[in-house]
Image: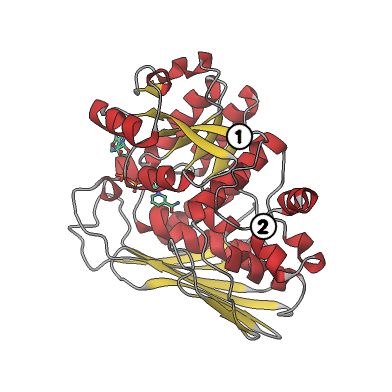
Amino acid sequence: MKSRRKFLQNITGSVIAIPFLSKIEYLESFKNIKDRSYDGPVLRVAIMGLGSYGTRVADAMKDCTKAKLVGVISGTPSKITAWQAKYNIPEKNCYNYENYDSIKSNPDIDAVYIITPNALHKDAAIRVAKAGKHVISEKPMSINAKDGQEMIAACKKANVKLLVGYRMHFEPKTLEVLRMRKDGEFGKVLFFQGLSGFQIGDPTQWRLKRESSGGGAMMDIGIYSINGARYMIGDEPIWVTAQETKTNKEKFKGGIDETIQFQLGFPSGAVASCLSTYSMNNLDRFFLNAEKGFAELQPSTGYGPIKGKTNKGELDYPHVTHQTVQMDRMAEIILEGKQPTVPVDGEEGLKDLKIIDAIYSAIKSGKKVSLSL
Ligand code: NAD
């Protein structure tokens, strides 16, 4: 039994192993229930930015087997106290934005997960890297490719890993579609449609301030369609065209995009047609069309359950808590050197940023922009 469990742990997240496993064994590898008998290495994580998504990650990490929340970085003392009580965090692992460079001399923290507004990711990542800790950054990794490159260079120099919170890269139904596509079950991929959007509320929030967000819906939610187009098609785009529309010029001002439609062209001739918006609800859909079949995920990137079907029928894989699985898999990447099916490293984050830069540039010029990823 023990060796079977070890075997399953070893193949965790690897779609290559599927043909050799029954579906039940494959599903077991995605289980998101804490394995209390596990006695291997554990990634000890401090979360920076104790907001809404930080809280979701912290709650999800309670069920992790290989990752553990052990520290916090926050500018709000009352939040630190509340998190200490809720997540059992010792005083010596609590930092604020002035003193967190001293995390360098804390041997009980391996990595910092940056979950602050987008424009703050870069400087935080560089400081964390300089402190010798692995960096996990939320998406978007930063607000443009230049900043992304600086983050990658800083982490390389400090010899620490840089990962991006692409939780969908570990989601079972998504991975099953990718397995089917890789195994040629759909035939030649011709078209992808990605719809990513929601109606944003409070006009005073940081997401609608360019200095904090770096842009509008594209940075926040449109990035899911960019990233999705790449992993669903399984290739890198070589050109982009884009068009912007605005229905509310007052709410979406100062470089905040409301709605952008964009198209990505791939070397095979496949095309992606995507929509990113802050003004429409019920937009969370991926559709992949290929010569012999199709795959549809709707919802495709929400917290789940993700629902999906292909020309062969419903995808009946069970729901997992994305953030639990993501953090266990990231622990394996950092501590055990494992390679995920779809990368979650800085280079992966940088590719999306290069596409975002190109989308904004295509809107400005009204022209097709070439991409070299
Ligand atoms: P939030 O506003 O709920 O939380 C942001 C946190 O950062 C707050 O605790 C805030 O106090 C702190 N903060 C530190 N410095 C700040 C500053 N100068 N201005 C404003 N806040 C500051 O936001 P969120 O929804 O938790 O988003 C945080 C990050 O997580 C973003 O990069 C976002 O894109 C990402 N996110 C990812 C997902 C996902 O599914 N992967 C989901 C939601 C958010």
Task: Give amino acid for label 2.
Answer: Ser
In the image, residue 53 lies at what x, y percent?
A: 37, 47
Question: Can you say whether 221 is above or below 190 in the image?
Answer: above
Residue at 80% in and 68% down: 19
Quick check: 151 left or right of 299? right
- Residue furthest right in the image: 20
Density class for disc 2 (Cα within 10 Å; few <14, some 14-19, many ≥20) is some
**Mark 1: which secondary structure?**
loop
The answer to which of marks 1 and 2 sits earlier in the sequence is 2
Q: Which residue is mark 2?
A: 29
In the image, residue 97 lies at what x, y percent?
A: 35, 23
Quick check: 148 left or right of 204? right
Residue at 59% in and 41% down: 346
Depth order, front residue of 70/216: 70
Quick check: 195 left or right of 77? right
Q: Which residue is mark 1?
A: 42
In the image, residue 212 lies at what x, y percent?
A: 32, 41
Label 1 near ligand 1 (CB < 8 Å): no
Task: Give amino acid for label 1.
Answer: Val
Image region (quadrant) for ligand 1:
top left
